[in-house]
Amino acid sequence: QVQLVESGGGLVQAGGSLRLSCTASGRTFSGHAMGWFRQAPGKERTKIATIRWSGNSIYYADSVKGRFTISKDNAKNTLYLQMNSLKPEDTAIYYCAAATVVPALFDYWGQGTQVTVSS
């Protein structure tokens, strides 16, 4: 079992920044990839950024490219999402996820952290 715990969400004004963290615990984490997803009210959960655990292959959704940066600290089993130039449309619950079997299948999820961007 892998437990994922997110932190760092909150309320910020448009144009501001936040950094989310996600720490993996439980059995020794040796997954293939980790990622950040978000779900806005009334909308489906969408993938916004992923990173391979070994190496640095990174994906960004077009909606966050150039504003968000995903990174990891393998020694701390921690994933980060630096969010800059935040917009009201970035308001959502942000979820951390881990892919432990194959890179494209995220099978462990955190509980989510709320990010609210005011205009």
Image (tube, rainbow, N blue to C red):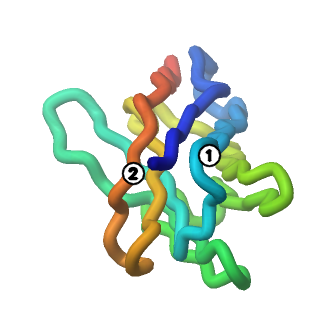
The amino acid beneath tag 1 is: Ala
The vertical placement of 50 against 12, above or below, is below
Distance from Cα at disc 1 to Cα at disc 2:
10 Å
Q: Earlier in the sequence, mark 1 or mark 2?
A: 1
Judge whether 67 appears above or below 86 on screen. Answer: below
Residue 103: % across, % down? 43, 78
> Furthest-left residue in view?
42
Q: Going by the image, does 70 lie left or right of 65?
A: right
Mark 2 neighbour class, 10 Å CA radius: few under 14, some 14 to 19, many 20 or more: some
Residue 60 screen position, x and y as percent: 51, 69
The residue at 63%/83% (across/down) is 57
Q: Amino acid at mark 2?
A: Tyr
In the image, residue 30 above or below residue 110: below
Which element is circle 1 on?
A: strand
Would you say 59 lies left or right of 95 here?
A: right
Q: Which one is in front, 107 or 95? A: 107
* Above or below, 40 relative to 9: below
Left or right of 22 on screen, residue 103:
left
Residue beneath disc 1: 24
Which residue is labeled 2 in the image?
108
Q: Secondary structure at mark 2?
A: strand
Image position, residue 6 (x, y; %): 57, 33
Residue at x-position 39% and y-position 31%: 93
Report if the CB atoms under discs 1 and 2 are less than 8 Å apart.
no
Residue at 74% over, 59% down = 72
For the point 34% across and 58% down, which residue is it?
107
Question: Which dot marks residue 59?
Answer: none
Q: Residues within 10 Å of mark 1 (few under 14, many from 20)?
A: many
3 or 78, nearer to the observer:
3
Q: Is residue 107 left or right of residue 79?
A: left
